[in-house]
């Protein structure tokens, strides 16, 4: 917490304006105002930022190839507790703070759930006072911006660094790090000791850009350090003595510059499909090597004892993307510190912990041996040695060769990164109860049977400061009026809201607040798309990446069914609904793109049909991301969490919606299971196959979608609509979607679950008519959402993983 008076702030702002731009305030642009404000705030926190860096306790380093931060100004002001004085001060200078807040860029350095989770964790680590820092990549281009052209997704590059620099970053050239690619590795004898020599490597410079992560009203300011890849500068401090010799030709110099800069150029836009691209492997090693070397340098600078690294440092890897932390740390301990393999291994395995975010086979990272050998010769040698020792351990323990093959780190010419992570870390966690159970009982069963003590669950969470306090100020105000301020630092206190579940006045207020948020979203939709949506209708929202398993298609089929019903019975009594979608598809994911086109075409059809006017609307909001989520989620009545059971590891938007009082329509998948445990089936709408049923079907080749199609005529009608011209302006995309359901036997059980989904949707509609019952349910949801604060999650990571204070002793080393 800092304090600054309005008067002091105005003086500060003015003099900053002069020193940065030599201009009077009233002549400066909005952009300049924003830069000046950010600069003033950075000055205010500077001392704390430096102070927080010196820590004698264990430090946590969270490695993630994505950090989906969202805009920072509002959340920084909130956490510092200076929003009011600064708002007032700016007002007197003729500047509107909300304009500045809205004009900030939204850095999209992540795809979705995993990247946003990393950002929520940073917020929580700082807010609970933990010394925890992030390492990632400063991509020049973040996730593409999405535009619809004739209903199809078109990707536009996200050129977010238009001004060259990001508002909140501080570049630190004196802390640049050398990362080595390719080359030859030799063992040479020096004074009777074998030394590893890496020659003819390609040197790449990792330039650190630091972003302050400000804790909520405490003294913590942690760091998110993002690395930019560059050609080594002339004054670069680190020696490149054994580096590859360049002839000095102009062309070669250009190629080399391109080689280095390409690495941090762009975020890969996939979030579920692994494609073994060389550039991706370069990105992974680049930020891992820079980060590990940075930790090591700091450690040595503080003259700490290398034999105790694991007592002072915790390294967490967010999915397998930073898995090379393992061999990179080994490399430093072996080649630079000269430790024995056994000791290096013992330190490494007690330093590194790993989170798994998916059970889908196609998302598992497997790198070709040949690729890694050439790009990272020394790292590959270490991975090979780890595998050799691991195999001999497995062979001494088991005789089942199939099991050993499944567990092997190197198999069929590929390096299995999940296997590497599990074999080399002291903790492996899933992100929700069901997901962790599936890891233990199905996907990673061999490993769980072997080392059950490594496995644990950490159900995801969300930064309630951003997703409730900042995104929904009116609801936050009501909560504070009812139960006081304490919930802001202890979200379990939200439970006290249940005392008001029969207070009609409170329920009316809740209704009013939801209505107001719906008006804000309606205005946005009107401005952007010229579509008139009625804030009195049910706002039914599905926002998340587009993927077959998330089943936006199931939602659409229900909309089509409803549409036909109204056409058949024009006088039918139906609660007016607005269906809202937001979703980006990976550019190479053809089926997902077809689904977007189909939804847009259906939206056109329905929104322009006078027969359903006032009853049905469908809006697909372009370019869904963090900023839009902050507008959309507080305005939702219904939260669609309808993935095929077993497929969604956790989901986190389900938690954001719940905290903002939406009612969840869900399968018992991911963290929906925990939501259900908290509030019971009477406070949400459940449907669909159970996990057991899905697993059984999968083991026995699925169900027959074509049989169902022929027996359920209602379903047949809407599926046929995809290909019979009923939906205007739809061509091959309709056929593609049709084929996924019928020709390819509906892998994600869309048709199988459609009827039960329709039933649940009907029940929901009935409930909405009873205003107090609906709002009571909404209140109960909010009251029980406290457990989903990422403060809770991060404290559990601290307690059970990073600070648990016991070592494991691996038998194989
Ligand atoms: C891998 C290799 C090459 C290129 C890209 C990737 C890649 C990138 C991102 C693979 C996966 C991702 C992201 C995965 C993700 O977001 N998973 C989600 O994580 C959330 C947080 O735990 C969960 O809530 C979601 O259920 C899970 O889908």
Image: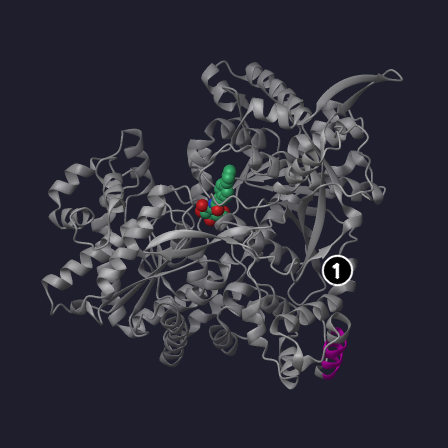
Q: Vertically, is 192 above or below 105? A: above
Residue furthest to the front in view is 250
Left or right of 774, for residue 415: right
| Location of residue 103 by image quarter | bottom right
Element type where label 1 sits in the image: helix
Q: Vertically, is 154 above or below 196? A: below
Pointer 1: residues within 10 angstroms few (<14), some, or many (20+)?
many
Q: Which residues are magenta?
A: 7-16
Q: Where is the N terminus found, in terms of image quarters?
A: bottom right
Left or right of 680, for residue 624: right
The residue under the point 36% across, 72% down is 526
Q: Residue 119: x, y in percent?
A: 57, 54
Chief secondary structure of the magenta span? helix
Q: Answer yes or no: is residue 638 visible.
A: yes
Q: Residue 671: x, y in percent?
A: 43, 50
Is residue 320 inside the magenta stretch?
no
Residue at which label 1 appears: 49
Q: Residue 751: x, y in percent?
A: 23, 45
Number of numbered callouts drawn: 1
């Amino acid at each position: 917490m800092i304090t600054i008076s309005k008067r002091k702030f105005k003086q500060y702002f003015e003099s900053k304006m002069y020193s940065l731009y030599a201009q009077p305030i009233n002549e400066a642009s909005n952009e300049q105002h924003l830069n000046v404000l950010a600069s003033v705030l950075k000055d205010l926190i500077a001392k704390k930022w430096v102070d927080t860096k010196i820590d004698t306790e264990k430090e946590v380093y969270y490695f993630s190839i994505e950090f989906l931060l969202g805009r920072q100004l509002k959340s920084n002001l909130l956490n510092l507790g200076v929003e009011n004085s600064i708002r007032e001060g700016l007002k007197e200078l003729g500047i509107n703070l909300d304009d500045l807040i809205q004009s900030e860029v939204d850095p999209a350095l992540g795809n979705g759930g995993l990247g946003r989770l990393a950002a929520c964790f940073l917020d929580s680590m700082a807010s609970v006072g933990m010394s925890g820092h992030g390492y990632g990549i400063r991509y020049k281009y973040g996730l593409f911006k999405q535009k619809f052209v004739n209903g199809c997704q078109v990707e536009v590059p996200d050129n977010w660094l238009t001004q060259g620099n990001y508002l909140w970053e501080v570049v630190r050239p004196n802390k640049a790090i050398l990362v080595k690619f390719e080359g030859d590795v030799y063992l040479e004898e020096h004074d009777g000791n074998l030394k590893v020599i890496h020659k003819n490597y390609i040197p790449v410079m990792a330039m650190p850009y630091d972003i302050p992560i400000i804790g909520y009203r405490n003294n913590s300011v942690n760091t998110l350090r993002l690395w930019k890849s560059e050609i080594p500068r002339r004054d670069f401090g680190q020696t490149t003595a054994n580096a590859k010799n360049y002839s000095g030709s102009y062309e070669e110099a250009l190629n080399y510059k391109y080689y280095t800069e390409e690495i941090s150029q762009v975020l890969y836009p996939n979030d579920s499909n692994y494609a073994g691209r060389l550039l991706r492997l370069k990105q992974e090693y680049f930020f891992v090597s820079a980060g590990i070397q940075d930790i090591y340098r700091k450690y040595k600078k503080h003259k700490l004892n290398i034999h105790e690294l694991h007592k002072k440092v915790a390294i967490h890897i967010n999915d397998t993307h930073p898995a090379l932390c393992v061999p990179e740390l080994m490399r430093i301990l072996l080649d630079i510190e000269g430790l024995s393999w056994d000791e290096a291994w013992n330190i490494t395995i007690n330093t590194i912990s790993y989170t798994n975010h998916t059970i889908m086979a196609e998302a598992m990272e497997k790198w070709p041996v040949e690729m890694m050998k050439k790009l990272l010769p020394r790292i590959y040698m270490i991975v090979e040695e780890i595998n050799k020792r691991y195999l001999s351990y497995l062979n001494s323990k088991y005789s089942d060769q199939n099991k050993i093959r499944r567990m092997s780190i190197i198999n069929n010419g590929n390096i299995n990164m999940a296997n590497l992570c599990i074999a080399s870390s002291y903790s492996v966690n899933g992100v929700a109860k069901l997901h962790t159970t599936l890891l233990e009982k199905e996907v990673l069963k061999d490993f769980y049977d072997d080392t059950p003590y490594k496995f644990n669950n950490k159900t995801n969470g969300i930064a309630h400061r951003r997703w409730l306090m900042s995104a929904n100020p009116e609801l936050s105000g009501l909560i504070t009026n009812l139960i006081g301020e304490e919930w802001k630092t202890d979200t379990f206190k939200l439970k006290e809201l249940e005392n008001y579940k029969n207070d009609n006045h409170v329920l009316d207020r809740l209704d009013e607040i939801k209505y107001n948020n719906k008006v804000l979203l309606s205005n946005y939709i009107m401005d952007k798309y010229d579509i008139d949506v009625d804030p009195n209708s049910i706002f039914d929202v599905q926002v998340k990446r587009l993927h077959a398993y998330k089943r936006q298609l199931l939602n659409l089929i229900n909309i089509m069914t409803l549409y036909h019903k109204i056409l058949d019975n024009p006088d039918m009594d139906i609660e007016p609904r607005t269906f809202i979608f937001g979703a980006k598809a990976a550019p190479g994911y053809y089926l997902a793109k077809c689904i977007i086109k189909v939804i847009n075409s259906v939206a056109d059809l329905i929104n322009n049909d006078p027969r359903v006017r006032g009853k049905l609307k469908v809006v697909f909001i372009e370019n869904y991301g963090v900023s839009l989520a902050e507008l959309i989620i507080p305005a939702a009545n219904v939260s669609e969490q309808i993935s095929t059971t077993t497929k969604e590891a956790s989901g986190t938007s389900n938690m954001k919606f719940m905290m903002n009082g939406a009612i969840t329509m869900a399968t018992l998948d991911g963290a929906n299971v925990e939501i259900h445990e908290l509030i019971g089936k009477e406070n949400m709408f459940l449907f669909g196959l159970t996990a057991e049923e899905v697993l059984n079907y999968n083991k026995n080749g699925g169900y027959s979608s074509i049989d169902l199609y022929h027996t359920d005529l209602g379903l047949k009608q809407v599926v046929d609509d995809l290909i019979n011209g009923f939906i205007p302006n739809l061509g091959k995309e309709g056929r593609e979607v049709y084929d996924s359901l019928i020709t390819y036997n509906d892998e994600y059980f869309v048709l199988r679950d459609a009827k039960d989904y329709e039933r649940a949707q009907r029940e929901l509609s009935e409930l909405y008519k009873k205003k107090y019952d609906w709002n009571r349910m909404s209140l109960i949801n909010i009251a029980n959402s406290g457990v989903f604060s990422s403060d809770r999650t991060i404290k559990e990571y601290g307690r059970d993983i990073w600070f648990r204070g016991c070592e494991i002793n691996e038998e194989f080393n």
